[in-house]
Image (cartoon, rainbow, N blue to C red):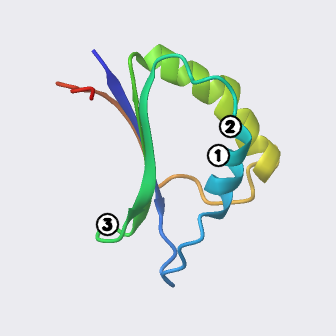
Amino acid sequence: MAVVFIQEFTADPSGDRETGNYDAVAEKVRGGPSPDGLIVHTAGYDEDAGVFRIVDVWRTREQGQAFLDGVVMPAVREVMGDDLSGGEPPSREAWYELHDVIEG
């Protein structure tokens, strides 16, 4: 069954919609082949919860973790430095199995 990987980052209380680190990392990640097992990637502000939320749906957790470890984290380190000092860690990060997925 498919799984979700979710990350939430506390949104800037000033209301600034600049996504800074996310956009820089996404630019480095895009353009390569479509990640094996990715069903959908979403990212956006949830103003009610006060977070910038990234939600990925993967066919398997192993495929998602391989992409995070092999592609995303090297891009994050390139943008933020090896010590990841260029930003706040996620306020929430979790994997969970989905009960149902409808693909369009």
Q: Residue 37, how many percent across, how many down?
A: 47, 17
Q: Are marks 2 and 1 in contact (CB under 8 Å)?
A: yes
Q: Are marks 3 and 2 in contact (CB under 8 Å)?
A: no
Q: Residue 58, how many percent across, how many down?
A: 41, 24
Q: Which one is earlier in the sequence, the residue at label 3 or at label 2? A: 2
Seen in the image, is 103 located left or right of residue 75?
left
Residue 29 disc label: 2
Other residues around mark 3 within 10 Å, as few (<14) / some (14–19) / many (≥20): few
Q: Do the residues labelled 1 and 3 touch (CB within 8 Å)?
A: no
Q: How far apart are marks 1 and 3 (CA)?
A: 23 Å
At 77% from the left edge and 52% from the top edge, which residue is drawn? 80
Q: Is residue 92 visible?
A: no
Up/down of 65 relative to 7, above or below = above
Q: Of helix, strand and loop, which one carries label 2?
A: helix
Quadrant where the image shows the N terminus: top left
Q: Which of 35 and 84 is in front in this view?
A: 35
> Looking at numbered disc 2 in the image, what kind of residue is underneath it?
Val
**Badge 1 is on which residue?**
26
Q: Which of marks 3 and 2 is in front?
A: 2
Residue 69: which quarter of the image? top right
> Looking at numbered disc 3 in the image, what kind of residue is underneath it?
Ala
At 46% from the left edge and 51% from the top edge, which residue is drawn? 43
Up/down of 35 relative to 10, above or below = above
Q: Of helix, strand and loop, which one carries label 3?
A: loop
Q: Can residue 9 be seen in this view?
A: yes
Q: Of helix, strand and loop, which one carries label 1?
A: helix
Q: Which one is earlier in the sequence, the residue at label 1 or at label 3? A: 1
**Badge 3 is on which residue?**
49
Other residues around mark 1 within 10 Å, as few (<14) / some (14–19) / many (≥20): few
Q: Residue 66, how many percent across, how many down?
A: 59, 19
